[in-house]
Image: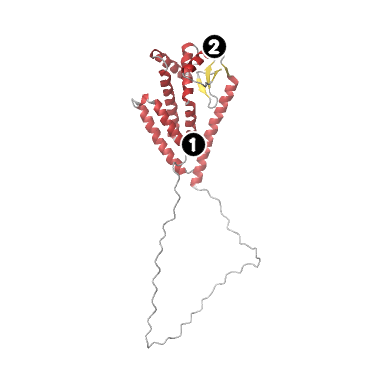
Amino acid sequence: MSLLTLGGLTLGGSAAAVLLALAGRTTWGRYGSKWRCWAWLALCLRLAVPLPLMPQSERRAPIQMDLPPAAAVPPAPVFPGDAPGPAPIPEPTPSVSAPEAPSCPDYQPPAPARRPSLSSAQIALGVWLLGAAAFLVRTGAAHLRFLRWLKRWAAPVTGGEAIAAFNQLGDRLGLDRRPRLLVCQGLKAPMLAGLLRPAILLPQEGVSGETLGFSLLHELTHYRRRDVWLKTLALWVNALHWFNPLMWYMVRLVERDIELACDEDALRSLPKSDFAAYGQTILDAVARLQGKDGM
């Protein structure tokens, strides 16, 4: 991989991210979060593989042209009255004798020692690798802590109301395969977690009735859309392009559009009379996650 390729790729990705961000601020763009998610997916797939699209053509040798042979110089004319004289004797040139080599046949003169030096490109590559590794290690450590927390505090849901609403919504959305349904102590709002073994996590306190149904609908819509995969892909792109501030901003835009697209899909399965209640449920969940209600 070439650093020039990575630099050109991150510049092009930055321009595309800015255009998508500006598109989301327009009036018609506020309702186009679904197509923006597809655009984010295409952009992240391109940025996730920092390689050129077309293989570089082999370098051809420069064209060589044969020069015409130099014209032969004609000999000087000889006139009849001229007699050839003796050729001048060249003066002997002093010769410098080379130092005699040792008589040992296996002797080889020592090669001059060369100090190892790093080029600027190698230093830049090392800094980029260290930054990407640090990002991945930090993200992986946080994920492992989360898994240990789930293993300690999460348990299968046993309440009949939650299981009935979960199965009913799964049938309505046409889900043949469904995530696990767990209850977790200390959780503030329902959430979908897990890439290979997804699970919907419910708080241990205070989610029931209409709020429970809307929360499960929101998380099951995330599961049907496979939004966890897009979020993971965006994090991988952020790890590769950690030096670019616009890539960090792009991750936030991806998460925003994922939530908006999920809400749009969820509202299509609800009557208009439930739109306000659904929106209030989502706002209350966001407020609890941000700690605005003291929970």
Residue 58, horizontal then vertical, whole percent: 45, 50
Look at label 2 and name its amino acid: Gly
Number of numbered discs overlaid on the protein picture = 2
Circle on res. 160:
2
Q: Is residue 235 left or right of residue 106?
A: left
Circle on res. 289:
none
Residue at the far bottom: name it. 81
- At x 45%, y 33%, the residue is 44
Chain-order first, disc 1 or disc 2: 2
**Could you say which quadrant of the image residue 275 lies in?**
top left
| Pair 1/2: label in front | 2
Residue 133, horizontal then vertical, whole percent: 53, 36
- At x 49%, y 30%, the residue is 232
Residue 290 appears in the rendering: no
- At x 51%, y 36%, the residue is 132
Name above or below for residue 110 compared with residue 153. below
Residue 121 appears in the rendering: yes
